[in-house]
Amino acid sequence: MAVLEQDGIAKLTMRRLAVDLDTGPASLYVYVRSTTEIHALVIDRLLGELELTWSGRGSWQTRLRRLLVGYIDILVQHPGLARSALVTWPDGRNYLDVLELALRLLSAAGVPDSRAAWGVDALLQQATAMAAEYGSRGEPDRPQSIEQLSALIDGADPARHPTLTRLGGAQLVGGQRDERRDWALDALVAGIVATPCRPGESRADTHHPGVNGQPAVDPRDLSSSASRQEVLPVHGQSDGVVTSSPPTSRGDS
């Protein structure tokens, strides 16, 4: 962790650890097999900073949003590690606790087990990709910028890309980062809940008893609530809104 904090993920290698521990790289292979495994262990340790319990009371939507936002915030602090997490799953109990909690929350929404299993994978992929992108924006040697992307869109040929030209760069890439993050997470969760069946899933398995004797959420109810702009609190505050249309910008603040 000291190497990660001081020098970044690029320096967190078997050779560097061997130097810091005053030993040879061959000695480390007794404990870890590769740099990838080191990254996996470090990611899992960082996930231990999250609150990974749920009493079963309160809004499952709020708790799931808080879990995913917390996950993103941890990885944003370590952009290189976030990029590594795109292709490396964490190794340890904390990661299993994340999966367990996310599955419980989807179960509370009435999502059948087979769909929840795929849904958690999709949610963590989205959250990890967000963290990798957001974290890299603050790096001084970043080769591209949001401004360049916006300029590319604004320079599109209106004859070839009429819809893109009509929306423009400001619609597609500007605005508040957190607003876009929350909308994307809400949209993905709503899709997981409302999707009728995944391939191979029996329709007889699409009903779930819910939590603590409370009826499960009907997917159609969640879908319709999105169109009614239902307020979903975030971190205990009533400022998260699921809307039927996305924010008009991508966000960089």
Image (cartoon, rainbow, N blue to C red):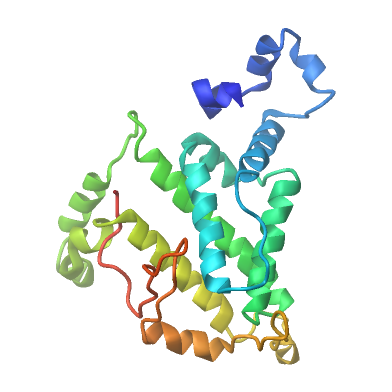
**Could you tell whether 215 is left or right of 62 in the image?**
right
In the rendered image, the vertical position of residue 237 relative to residue 14, given as above or below: below
**Could you tell whether 33 is left or right of 110 in the image?**
right
User: What residue sits 64% from the left and 84% below the top?
Assistant: 197
Position in image of residue 251 (x %, y %): 29, 55
Q: Specify the quadrant of the image occupied by residue 196.
A: bottom right
Q: Is residue 126 visible to the viewer in this orientation of the structure?
A: no
- Name the quadrant of the N terminus: top right
Position in image of residue 72 (x %, y %): 50, 50
Q: Nearer the viewer, residue 56 or 85?
A: 56
Q: Nearer the viewer, residue 9 or 214?
A: 214
- Count of labels in the image: 0
Position in image of residue 194 (x %, y %): 55, 83
Position in image of residue 45 (x %, y %): 66, 38
User: What residue sits 50% from the left and 35% below the top?
Assistant: 80
In the rendered image, the vertical position of residue 50 relative to residue 217, given as above or below: above
User: What residue sits 33% from the left and 29% below the top?
Assistant: 140
**Could you tell whether 149 is left or right of 134 in the image?**
left
Q: Specify the quadrant of the image occupied by residue 105.
A: bottom right
Q: Is residue 184 visible to the viewer in this orientation of the structure?
A: yes
Q: Quick one: which residue is furthest to the right in this view?
A: 30
Q: Quick one: which residue is furthest to the top in this view?
A: 22
In the rendered image, the vertical position of residue 39 relative to residue 3, given as above or below: below
Q: Nearer the viewer, residue 163 or 54?
A: 54
